[in-house]
Image (spheres, grey):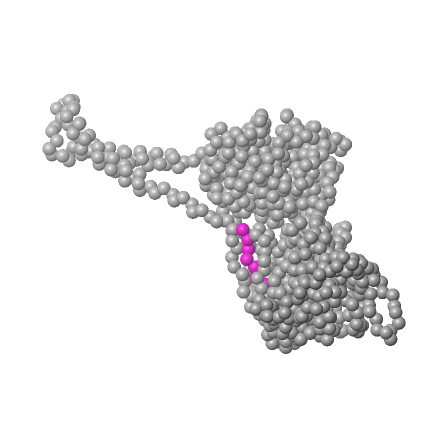
């Protein structure tokens, strides 16, 4: 006994595809991401009936006279069957429903908002809500006799509920974790044994786990040695005698529950992909229908296995042939004695049998060895799926209403009418750039890019490029056809350039008005293309993917007049992730985001990528996603659209744009110290507004926090690493005010070193602009020998009266008042509080005047004036030298 496969049929577009058999088995009903419902009389039906219910249909269920479907309006809608007329709404969710089951009078549905609703009858008021999952619901099943419901969620948990009392009975962890239903490949798919409900099976990795529902312990596990990938779903047969399971490589296993063994199933064809849904025929329990992730429909049906019978017949033929040789052997043997009438010679029979026993055995062994057993299939290594080319800030092309481009300039929207006509709408955030446009899409463009200088349109199925120059006068539109039937894989338009990546691995660069500038070769398959003014960045596959990740690189192209500069950059990507957005900040820094919400920024001066924001940590639910639109480096924000339970925003109604705060993923980010360190790093990494002032303020706050935490070494290390003399003065003031004389003394010793570093940085900046390499030369540090050569200061004995005077001098509020010259009238100086520190520093820098006053550098220790400065080999500024000598 074995199962054979039918030919695959195209049912729906790429994406999750669901199916079911009607109760009597007369129809196979399928649904998919194209929003259609199709009725198939059988797998060979060449003209299935099709009905469009919306932009997508995630799941369906049959209740006898009605068909229930999950629509793009986040509802469970009822339709009459087979007329498919609307018959009301049963449930509403805040996100699309992903799974649906109907048993008797009970209807259960799970959604991407992590909630499950159970409806009894048709009264909308009899809804029971099950809450406890923290991820999108992937699959569920019910056994109504015992009021049991099992659900699998993207949080990696399987929960068993009593849906009548809304209580949780069992929680099982260890299943795959995903943040959206669309990105899931293993659904778990719990299924109760339909006859008695004594067993509950679910798929995890490469095995089927069967639980005993009496004690919720593992009864046994089912495995198929012929399967080389993980199971994605499973389903009991209506009589409970068999269980079918599908894998992520399109393989189907059928298990005999009584024998706990796998039944032979024909291997899948090469074009079969991950199985998303299985269904047993109710009329003939020897047929299983399935759908894969590319929208294909197929069946597996039982057939009699004739292989064993053929082998048995072959052995019988060999035996008959050998016996015929034995029968006529005596006729050709002259030494064989003749028979005496009807008598039989027993001795002769023994001799004949003994002589021919060995030849018969040898012949049988040779015949059996001639049938070579099929070699076991070589283990196949599952590689990570290589990402195909995409347009940043665009939604998938198979949607009827989609965003073709959404950035900080405007929005390009594509529409496909039911009649087949398509159009493109262009809206600008700033109406002064250009007025809105409505374009008839005769050329079937599905790629678009918008900038303040041009609107570029193309199609990945044609070789025509159309560009509309927005700021030009006269003939604004130009077009051209790519040579040798090249098609466009990626497209970008900036304020000065238009670039396309073609199927021939060429990067063709044009000016906004159509002048052909450059043609570059691309080292690998294109992933995405972005641009900003005179710069372009193209991400491509640098090598084949491994089992856990893909390897990407980037071409950073900068055009200045007729000269061109090209840099190849590695693209860091977390294992198991794909790029979801690529672009530039408004200051021209390359940026990218993966599909899990991690945003990274490339700093050219450091030649490194820095993670600057994790959007998923700013989301209230794991099923929500942020659709990145733009990155503002000056304002330190990320502009994105919140997609509840989906990966892409809806076109109608238009979602609101949100501003997310940038936050580097540091350790213990809730602590005040980590928040200040995050602000300090962002002010040093990015070209933010008032970055220098923010850096000083954050640094002095960190310095104060280190002082209050009794970490003087960390405070000194902070000032030394930033190497700013103005910040040093602020730190000395604060340390002196807090009475930390030892710390302020050690900070004063850093002045020559920090001043030399600052001067060397200025020289390095000037020389680096001229293309000359510069090296920072630190001041000479005194050695132990030189320290021992000079006269050592003698300790000064202080009397009790002098100690009291020093204590009053230190605690005096007028300690930091300026010692004015006689010709200058006295002025009242405010106290050196923490609020006045920044104002004092800014006023000193602004005026640039040097007033002879008692500063923290000479007021730290009145007795330190007798110390002699050691030769450091550095010439100081006149003011700082005077302060240091004092």
Q: Is residue 3 left or right of residue 159?
A: left
Whether residue 45 can be seen here: no
232 or 132, which is in the foreground?
Answer: 132
Q: Quadrant of residue 527?
A: bottom right
Which residue is at the far right? 825
**551 within the magenta span:** yes
Residue 292, x across and y down, in percent: 57, 45
Q: What residue is at 61 percent from the left and 67 percent from the top?
A: 556
Identify the residue at image location x=27%, y=33%: 320
In the image, 606 versus 529, the foreground residue is 606
Q: What is the x, y in percent for residue 752?
A: 67, 69
Depicted 391 relative to depicted 376: above or below: below
Q: Is residue 208 magenta?
A: no
Image height of 739 relative to 477, above or below: above
Quadrant of the image for the N terminus? top left
Quadrant housing residue 806: bottom right
Q: Look at 65% across and 48% down and name the residue there.
A: 34
Q: Is residue 774 above or below residue 353?
A: below
Q: Residue 446 occupies which quadrant of the picture?
A: bottom right
* Residue 734 percent location from the top left of the image: 75, 59
For residue 118, say whether it is visible: yes
Nearer to me, 105 or 522: 522
Q: Position of residue 141 (x, y in %)?
A: 62, 33
Name the residue: 75% across, 57% down: 739
Q: Is residue 835 left or right of residue 678?
A: right
* Magenta-tinted stretch: 548-554
Q: Quadrant of the C terminus?
A: bottom right
């Amino acid at each position: 006994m074995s199962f054979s496969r039918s030919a695959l049929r195209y049912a729906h577009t790429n994406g999750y595809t669901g199916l079911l058999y009607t109760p009597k088995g007369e129809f196979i009903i399928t649904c998919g991401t194209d929003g259609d419902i199709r009725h198939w009389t059988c797998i060979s039906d060449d003209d299935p009936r099709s009905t469009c219910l919306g932009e997508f249909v995630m799941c369906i269920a049959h209740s006898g006279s009605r068909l229930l479907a999950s629509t793009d309006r986040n509802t469970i809608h009822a339709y009459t069957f087979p007329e498919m007329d609307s018959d009301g709404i049963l449930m509403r969710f805040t996100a699309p429903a992903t799974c649906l089951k109907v048993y008797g009078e009970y209807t259960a549905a799970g959604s991407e908002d992590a909630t499950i609703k159970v409806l009894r009858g048709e009264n909308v008021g009899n809804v029971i809500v099950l809450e406890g999952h923290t991820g999108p619901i992937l699959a569920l099943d019910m056994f109504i006799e015992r009021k049991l419901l099992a659900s699998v969620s993207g949080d990696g948990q399987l929960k068993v509920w009593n849906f009548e009392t809304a209580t949780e009975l069992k929680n099982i962890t260890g299943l795959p974790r995903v943040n959206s239903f669309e990105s899931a490949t293993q659904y778990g798919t719990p299924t109760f044994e339909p006859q008695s409900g004594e067993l509950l099976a679910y798929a995890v990795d490469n095995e089927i786990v069967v639980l005993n529902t009496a004690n919720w312990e593992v009864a046994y596990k089912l495995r198929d040695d012929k399967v080389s990938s993980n199971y994605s779903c499973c389903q009991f047969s209506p009589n409970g005698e068999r269980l079918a399971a599908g894998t992520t490589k399109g393989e189907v296993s059928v298990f005999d529950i009584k024998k706990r063994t796998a039944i032979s199933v024909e291997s899948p064809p090469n074009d079969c992909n991950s199985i998303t849904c299985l269904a047993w025929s109710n009329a003939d329990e020897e047929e299983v229908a399935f759908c894969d992730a590319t929208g294909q429909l197929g069946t597996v049906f039982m057939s009699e296995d004739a292989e064993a019978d053929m082998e048995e017949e072959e052995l019988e033929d060999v035996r008959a042939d050998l016996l015929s040789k034995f029968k006529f052997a005596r006729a050709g043997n002259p030494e064989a004695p003749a028979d005496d009438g009807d008598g039989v010679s027993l001795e002769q029979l023994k001799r004949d049998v003994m002589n021919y026993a060995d030849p018969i055995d040898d012949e049988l062994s040779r015949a059996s060895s001639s049938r070579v057993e099929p070699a076991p299939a070589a283990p196949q290594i599952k590689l990570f799926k290589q990402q195909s080319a995409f347009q940043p800030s665009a939604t998938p092309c198979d949607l009827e209403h989609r965003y073709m481009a959404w950035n900080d300039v405007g929005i390009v929207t594509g529409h496909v009418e039911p009649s087949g006509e398509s159009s493109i709408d262009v809206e600008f955030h700033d109406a002064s750039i250009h007025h809105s446009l409505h374009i008839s899409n005769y050329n079937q463009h599905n790629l678009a890019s918008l900038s303040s200088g041009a609107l570029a349109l193309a199609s990945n199925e044609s070789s025509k490029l159309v560009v509309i120059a927005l700021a030009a006068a006269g003939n604004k539109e130009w077009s051209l056809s790519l040579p040798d039937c090249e098609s466009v894989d990626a497209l970008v338009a900036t304020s000065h350039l238009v670039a396309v990546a073609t199927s021939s691995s060429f990067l063709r660069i044009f000016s906004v008005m159509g002048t052909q500038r450059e043609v570059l070769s691309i080292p690998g398959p294109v992933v995405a293309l972005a641009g900003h003014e005179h710069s372009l960045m193209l991400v491509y596959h640098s090598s084949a993917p491994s089992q856990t990740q893909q390897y990407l690189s980037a071409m950073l192209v900068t055009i200045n007049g007729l000269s061109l500069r090209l840099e190849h950059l590695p693209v860091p990507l977390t294992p198991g992730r794909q790029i979801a957005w690529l672009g530039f900040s408004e200051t021209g820094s390359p940026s990218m985001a993966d599909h899990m919400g991690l945003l990274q920024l490339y700093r050219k001066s450091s030649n490194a990528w820095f993670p600057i924001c994790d959007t998923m940590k700013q989301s209230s639910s794991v099923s929500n996603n942020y659709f990145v639109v733009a990155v503002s480096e000056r304002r330190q924000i990320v502009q994105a659209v919140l997609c509840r339970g989906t990966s892409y925003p809806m076109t109608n109604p238009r979602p609101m744009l949100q501003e997310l705060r940038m936050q580097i993923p540091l350790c213990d980010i809730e602590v005040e110290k980590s928040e200040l360190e995050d602000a300090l790093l962002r002010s040093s990494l990015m070209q933010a507004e008032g970055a220098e002032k923010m850096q000083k303020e954050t640094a002095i706050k960190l310095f104060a926090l280190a002082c209050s935490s009794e970490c003087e070494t960390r405070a000194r290390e902070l000032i030394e690493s930033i190497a700013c003399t103005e910040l040093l003065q602020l730190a000395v003031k604060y340390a002196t005010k807090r009475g930390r004389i030892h710390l302020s003394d050690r900070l004063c010793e850093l002045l020559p070193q920090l001043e030399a570093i600052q001067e060397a940085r200025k020289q390095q900046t000037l020389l680096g602009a001229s293309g000359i390499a510069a090296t920072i030369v630190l001041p000479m540090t005194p050695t132990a020998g030189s320290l021992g050569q000079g006269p050592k200061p003698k300790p000064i004995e202080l009397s009790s009266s002098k100690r009291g005077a020093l204590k009053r001098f230190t605690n005096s509020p007028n300690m930091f008042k300026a010692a004015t010259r006689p010709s200058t009238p006295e002025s009242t100086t405010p106290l050196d509080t923490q609020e006045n520190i920044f104002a004092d520093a800014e006023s000193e820098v602004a005026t640039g005047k040097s007033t002879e006053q008692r500063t923290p550098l000479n007021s730290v220790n009145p007795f330190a004036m007798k110390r002699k400065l050691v030769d450091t080999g550095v010439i100081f500024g006149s003011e700082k030298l005077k302060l240091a000598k004092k």
